[in-house]
């Protein structure tokens, strides 16, 4: 019994340095759709307001950025087209995922409520 406790304690002590090395790689912001300005092309920039009172943040988009609408990946032109017909932009939420090391947006996703 004591051997199991000693082994468990040693395993926990070995895990502490690994936990200390964890760092934040990506950060996601949830915004309303009316507070996001999409890029014109895949090599452009996206601007978004993390909160209603915040200033716009502007970041370049990754060449491999994922544009996702209702769980379906698509190209930017189709994403822009489908979002352009949304009427209640203040009620819809969009998520912008920013990769901190690359300083680029790597994913933009939205789930439209009452989508057709």
Image (tube, grey):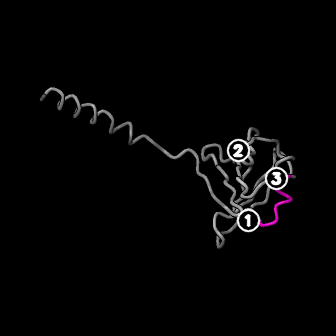
Point out residue 73 in the picture as x, y percentages from the top left corner.
75, 41
Compared across the picture, whether 94 is left or right of 22 comes to right
Q: Quadrant of the N terminus?
A: top left
Q: Is residue 38 magenta?
A: no
Say above or below: 3 vs 37.
above
Q: Residues within 10 Å of mark 3 (few under 14, many from 20)?
A: some
Say above or below: 68 vs 93.
above
Mark 3, secondary structure of its residue: loop
Q: Nearer the viewer, mark 1 or mark 3?
A: 1
Q: Residues within 10 Å of mark 2 (few under 14, many from 20)?
A: few
Q: Which residue has dot 3 on it?
A: 39
The image quadrant that residue 115 belongs to is: bottom right
Say above or below: 68 vs 9.
below
49 or 89, which lies in front? 89
Q: Which residue has dot 2 on it?
A: 71
Mark 2, secondary structure of its residue: loop
The number of numbered badges drawn on the structure is 3
Q: Nearer the viewer, mark 2 or mark 3?
A: 2
């Amino acid at each position: 019994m004591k051997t199991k406790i000693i082994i468990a304690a040693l395993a926990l002590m070995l895990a502490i340095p690994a936990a200390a090395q964890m760092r934040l790689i990506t950060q996601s912001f949830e915004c309303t759709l009316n507070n996001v300005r999409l890029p014109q092309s895949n090599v452009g920039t996206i601007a978004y307001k993390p909160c209603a009172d915040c200033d716009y943040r502007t970041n370049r988009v990754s060449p491999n950025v994922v544009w996702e609408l209702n769980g379906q990946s698509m190209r930017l032109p189709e994403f822009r087209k489908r979002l352009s017909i949304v009427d209640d932009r203040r009620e819809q939420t969009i998520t912008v995922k920013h990769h901190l090391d690359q300083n680029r947006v790597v994913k933009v996703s939205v789930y439209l409520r009452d989508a057709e």
